[in-house]
Amino acid sequence: MAKKTPPLRIIPLGGLDGIGKNMTAIECGPDMVLIDAGLMFPDDSQPGIDLVLPDYTYVLENEDKLRGIIVTHGHEDHTGALPYLLQDLNNKVPIFSSKLTLGFIEGKLAEFRIKAPKFREVKSGSHINLGGISVDFFSMTHSIPGALGVYIKTTQGTIMHTGDFKLDQTPIDGVTPDYAAISRFAKQGVDLLLSDSTNATVPGFTKSEAEVGPTLNDVIKNAPGRVFVASFSSHIHRLQQICDAAKRCGRKIVVTGRSMLTNTRVARELGYLKIDEQDIIDAYEVNGIPDDRIVVMCTGSQGEPLSALSRMANGEHKTLSIHAGDTVIISATPVPGNEKAVQQVINSLAKLECTVVDKSTKLVHVSGHGSQEELKLMLTMAKPTYFMPVHGEAVHLRAHANLARKVGIADDHIFLLDNGDTLEMRGGIVRRGPAVESGVVYVDGLRIGDTDPIVLRDRQKLANDGMVTVVATVSLKRKKIDAVELSSRGVSFNIDEEFSSDAAAAVMKAIEKGKFDYTRNGTGALNKAVRDSISNFIWNRTRTRPMIIPVVMEV
């Protein structure tokens, strides 16, 4: 019997449970390519965690197959895991992306002191062969230059991956989506389409980036004092419009914030951001310039505590300050989970009596992702046989699946996957395949990957209800507890003499009812009895459940 040829496998390792940590492996026989390697920032349920990465164990286990890493564009949710992945890979595979994206990646790797692997610049129209996997690139419009989609051909079928996109007809750099390429690939045949779902719940079309410019110009022109604009440092199109508006209004440009300084430098060196040398000044040089002649581009649009905007709002920035009469433009939308942090910064700015402008009051921000009508247009242009929505939370993926049904894709040809689920394609026919190991990897300081979920649960408990330490002194000879002492941190109740006496009595009663091994090796059950009795006592008395740390001392 002839050996069955291996299928084309589509393996999403991240990006299907939120906006972030995008990573998809495409595997066909002895060859595999990786599309994107991103991270996600932690939310309130992950205290103390710095970054969240996709679990790329499957890539490491199959790195002998890995022929290359394709990065669709330069945002952190598509590039941020690269330093960690590259350190774990023995095989230094090449990275393929646009010039700006490679520039950003090179800067990121330099921060980690990682020697850059082989960079291979590609652009719209580029074609590469990675083993038996053929890849064509086509331009897409997003909130960063150099965004690319990919068309993949193998012996088992074809895949189109849109990357992040919107169908902007008036992009700032003049680079529109390559509709001709999309139509050409559609004629060749798209067996499976993977498409951005971020705005699948938003009706209509996303406004063009060009519509933000006039508003920015108007706000800057009419501002009586300094203007501070907080934006994503990788949003080069937005930064270009800010610089253009500043120049038209006769203002000098100041750049502050580590990532803003790095990205503007890279973008200027590569020709993506055009600022005349005489129009940009150092933050240390602003004191001699009138306030109405300054525009500051800074980080902090997401309320990050250590960002330039947050430090200026709290009076902690070493060179710049914000005061009454200044104008602060927040030119971004809070990423889900960051709303509280952004509002805290706005409240701090309000106390300084400066004017705050955001998208709720003026058109100072538009999304970089296509809304429902653009997503339907992409589905109609690509004409896929099968469809898998990617890049979104569960609600976005399901809304995108519903749009696909509306344009005529059969329900059994639409696949809603979770990270680690797989699809297998044979002769253009797509079916579900066996799942692979998946999940998340936490970056906690210098520790990577070994933060136990129990640790996060304990941190949440400490944050919510505090901690009570119970020291029980056990007499091994008399086989009884002689004394119980309580101390606390961060609890909402007062541990006075009466409370301590009643708690000690509760512990003594629990111990008297139980039978314990009063040897030096038998304190495990005693610890549990002390913890449980104090936990129940505090719950009955205060209706709170602080963390209980029992300490049994033997005498």
Image (tube, helix red, strand yellow):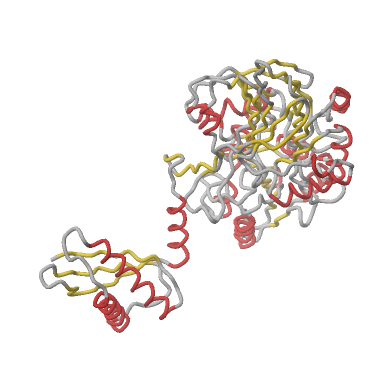
Query: Between 55 and 282, which is closer to the camera in this rendering?
Result: 55
Residue sticking out furthest to the bottom: 498
Query: In x, y percent, where is residue 100?
Result: 68, 26
Q: Quadrant of the N terminus?
A: top right
Query: In x, y percent, where is residue 440?
Result: 54, 43
Query: Between 97 and 426, which is closer to the camera in this rendering?
Result: 426
Query: In x, y percent, where is residue 542?
Result: 43, 78
User: Is 483 placed left or right of 100 in the picture?
Assistant: left
Query: In x, y percent, where is residue 41?
Result: 57, 46
Query: Between 430 and 64, which is closer to the camera in this rendering?
Result: 430
User: Is 477 placed left or right of 170 in the picture?
Assistant: left
Residue 346, placed above or below residue 78: below
- Quadrant of residue 182 within the rendered picture: top right
Q: Quadrant of the C terminus?
A: bottom left
Q: Residue at x 24, y 74 (%)?
A: 484
User: Is 12 placed left or right of 478 in the picture?
Assistant: right
